[in-house]
Image (cartoon, rainbow, N blue to C red):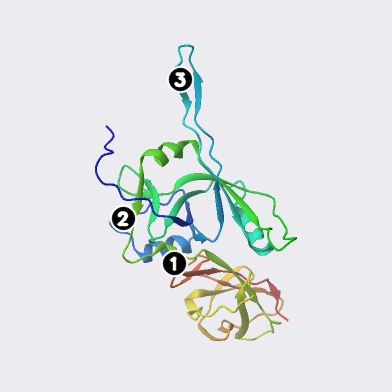
Amino acid sequence: MARIGGIFCDEKQALGFMLVDRSIKFDPATFSKTILDGFIAQDKIIGTVKDFNAEDADVDPGFTDMSNGERIQNTIGMKRWNLTFYRGNCFQNQIQKLNRSERYGIMFVLEDGSVLGREMKDGTVKGFDVKLFTGVKKIKTAAEGGGSSLMIDLTRTAMSPWQATSILMQDDEVDFLEVNPVAALDIKVPILTVGATTTVVNVSNMCADSVVSGLNEPDNWKMVDNDVLKAITAVSEINGAYTLTHPALVVDHLVSFKTDNAGYPVVAIDTNYYAGESMKKTVV
């Protein structure tokens, strides 16, 4: 039976959303920032996406009108959104990787830092399964306009939970509005010379060309030497220029440097997350 009497809190505004791998479930009893960082490090959570225009593109329920004036419901309808992001071509290049994806569920992040998700029968919380499609990028030809678009469709199986088993999850340790999406890094490598045991790489944000600092732990890096991972033993940084200490370089080997966190590509620094790998260069 529906219990719609009493006092109900008004719904808070959604200021962002997270895309979460469909396999991921949060247990509110044991959830922590460490667990969240672990999922993001494995590239199973994109982070909280903000700053977009959203419009509903719902498909209404389907009905059949009876000859006696009554009607019956054939379908429950479908939930859809069209989102527009006013960002440049680099953002478009990244968001295009989501086109036709059926990997993720969606969790909405509300203004108080909580998330709206789907409550499972075991008490865990996960996202509502979605299909993702990108629209045609529009170029900015006037003072306003341009941007990238993302279409989000709840799956047929997600509609029943959307209507009947949604839940808010809060955590004292995590404000989900502060959990940023993973940022791609541009890692520039100089000429690599045989026998060198240090290399200075310049690290910036791929889509903004701004210096990225804070990746100072050796465990955040790996050298890829002829497709073999090798440890970085020391790191120092000055204004985005990182000096990496590594095994001696061997002539004619193909070498690159990449972020690495216990075998995963994403590195967490507070509520910021980074991933990147340089181009391969031949040691001379």
Q: Position of residue 27 (x, y in %)?
A: 32, 54
Q: Which amino acid is tagged 2?
A: Pro
Give the Cα separation between the discs numbered 2 and 1.
Answer: 18 Å
Question: Measuring 49% from the left and 11% from the top, which residue is drawn there?
Answer: 67
- Mark 3 element type: strand
The residue under label 2 is 28
Q: Which image quarter holds the C terminus?
A: bottom right
Residue 259 lies, with reference to residue 28, above or below; the image says: below
Residue, far right: 141
Quadrant assignment, res 185:
bottom right
Q: Mark 1 = which residue? A: 178
Residue 252, given in percent of the width and then of the height, sits at 72, 76
Q: Earlier in the sequence, mark 2 or mark 1?
A: 2
Residue sitting nearer the eye, 128 or 14? 14
Residue assigned mark 3: 71
Compared to residue 86, the image places residue 60 above or below, namely above
Is the residue under label 2 in contact with that under label 3 (CB below 8 Å)?
Answer: no
Farthest residue to the left: give it: 6
> Which quarter of the figure is the N terminus placed in?
top left
- Left/right placement of residue 97 relative to residue 31 reads right
- Percent x, y of residue 163: 40, 39
Mark 2: few/some/many CA within 10 Å (<14, 14-19, 20+)? few
Say what amino acid the circle numbered 1 marks: Glu
The residue carrying pointer 1 sits among few (fewer than 14), some (14 to 19) or many (20 or more) residues within 10 Å by Cα, namely few
